[in-house]
Image: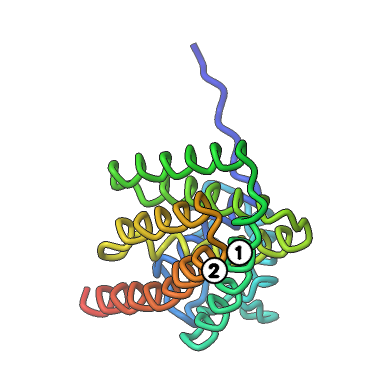
Amino acid sequence: MNLPASKPPTADVLYERIETLIAEGHFKDGERLDEMRLARDFGVSRTPLREALRLLSATGLVGLIPNRGAFVRQPDFTRLVEMFEVMAEVEAWCARLAAGRITKAQLLLLRQAASACEAALQAQDYKRYYVENATFHTMIYEASGNGFLAEEARSLHRRLKPFRQAQLSFGDRLSQSMIEHREVLLALEAGDAARADSVMRDHIRVQGSIYEEYRQSMNGARDSA
């Protein structure tokens, strides 16, 4: 029996895959992305690949130079810290508001999301953990009761996604992240706005530094290979 061939990845899927490869350090800053090789590796034509690169250029992760091609643009440490500082303040605000507004139903779902993170931690599956982690954070955005703030938080979260996911694979970050999640959950259960604000801010701000350590270790590994 002939099975139907799987569909080639779309531009959006290619965008996410290349974004992850860049964040995980598979390409150096300034490295040229070979379209022909990438198209072959992903099993696609160059049309969706070029669209994916165009999408990546909009985020600043890729620079498109006419007649020369696409080049990786890793954010420098200062820029990364700035991005995480803004994200930390936005998420802290969400947590502070959520402490006074979260419903019993939302709190139940948040506990379930935290349990899913615990299961991913036990499996030491950082990519699965990130998916469950994203659900946990998104629920807090929604529980803030401020639709505009939640929208801005989701947008920033999406922009930082590859860096937040990559840093989870470094050292004992996965375990530490779960400890921080438990503290956030306890603060929300207690309705402690000040505590929720503080622990969420710390939870996000540290990720920039952890990611930079991760990237330095990846660069060192590549240089010694």
Tag nearer the camera, 2 or 1: 2
Q: Is residue 11 visible?
A: no
Report the Cα–Cα distance between label 2 and label 1.
7 Å
* Residue drawn at 32 percent across, 63 percent down: 173
Q: Secondary structure at mark 1?
A: helix
* Residue drawn at 51 percent across, 80 percent down: 80
Residue 5: horizontal and vertical position, in percent? 55, 28
Residue 145: horizontal and vertical position, in percent? 73, 54
Q: Is residue 121 above or below residue 97?
A: above
Residue 180: horizontal and vertical position, in percent? 39, 60
Q: Secondary structure at mark 2?
A: helix
Colour mode? Answer: rainbow
Q: Residue furthest right?
A: 148
* Numbered tag placed on residue 194 in the rendering: 2
Residue 36: horizontal and vertical position, in percent? 54, 61
Q: Identify which residue, 83 or 35, lies in the foreground.
A: 83
Q: Residue furthest top?
A: 1
**Residues packed near mark 2 inside 10 Å, few (<14), some (14 to 19) or many (20 plus):** some
* Numbered tag placed on residue 20 in the rendering: none
Q: Is residue 56 visible?
A: yes
* Numbered tag placed on residue 96 in the rendering: 1
Residues tagged 2 and 1 counted as in contact (Cβ below 8 A) = yes
- The amino acid on which the numbered mark 1 sits, given as a three-letter code, is Arg
Q: Is residue 192 above or below residue 73?
A: above
* Residue drawn at 41 percent across, 65 percent down: 24
Q: Is residue 224 above or below residue 125?
A: below
- The amino acid on which the numbered mark 2 sits, given as a three-letter code, is Ala
